[in-house]
Image (tube, rainbow, N blue to C red):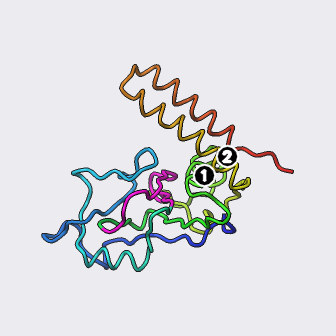
Amino acid sequence: MEKVVISVKTGLNPRKNFQLNTQDAKNYYVTVKEMTSGKIVFSDRTDKINDEAISIISNRSNLEFGDVLFSGIGTIGKIAIVDIPVNNWNVSESVFVIKPNINFIVAKFLMYVLGSNYIKNQYEGKSVGSTLKGVRMATLLAIEIPIPPIKVQKRIVAILDKFDKLVCDINEGLPAEINARRKQYEYYRDKLLTFKEA
């Protein structure tokens, strides 16, 4: 992955840097629990941080629109794309901020490929820690990602977006149908994102 990204950084832990939920806190502090279905979703349970904390975290994470987020500690492998303005939120130290090099990889393609079983198999066996499992940045950077031409990446993203929308649309349906659609989605995602070695 190192060849197709500009940088991989993380947010910050509040321990020595700032406090959560102070009286002047009106910005969001994003952890794995806010990463839902490939998006960032704030809730009334999302911790808040003040403007000074946002500035401190931003200096480290350099969070920008189009970045891909990857949860690296605890619940490993949850992914989201930054598709909302970043002026009122930033991420914790457990979230990797991956800045794709758009000359080589489409951000949403990177998001989908990181969620595939092909990639999960590469990092799951290399997680470290006894109580709280985590993936090291070096492990993440060493992941081998298939890189088809940009045109092909965009076509794959368009197909997976349609499947994704279909799964979201039926979330109100019967549990058996939802499960079937999710399995179908995962099957096609993994088929589209598995490339034979030349």
Q: Residue at x 69, y 37 (%)?
A: 191
- Asked whether 74 falls inside the magenta stretch, the response is yes
- The residue beneath circle 1 is 109
Q: Is residue 167 left or right of residue 28?
A: right
Quadrant in the rendering for residue 123 = bottom right
Q: Secondary structure at mark 2?
A: helix
Q: Can residue 170 be seen?
A: yes
Does 77 sit above or below residue 190? below
Looking at the image, the residue that sits furthest to the left is 23
Quadrant in the rendering for residue 159 = top right
**Looking at numbered disc 1 in the image, what kind of residue is underneath it?**
Phe
State which quarter of the image contains the N terminus. Answer: bottom right
Magenta stretch: dominant SS? Answer: loop
Magenta-drawn segment: 68-87
Query: Alpha-carbon distance for marks 1 and 2?
Result: 14 Å
Does 110 sit above or below residue 60? above
Q: Residues within 10 Å of mark 1 (few under 14, many from 20)?
A: many
- Asked whether 121 falls inside the magenta stretch, the response is no
Q: Residue at x 67, y 46 (%)?
A: 118
Q: Residues within 10 Å of mark 2 (few under 14, many from 20)?
A: some
**Looking at numbered disc 2 in the image, what kind of residue is underneath it?**
Tyr
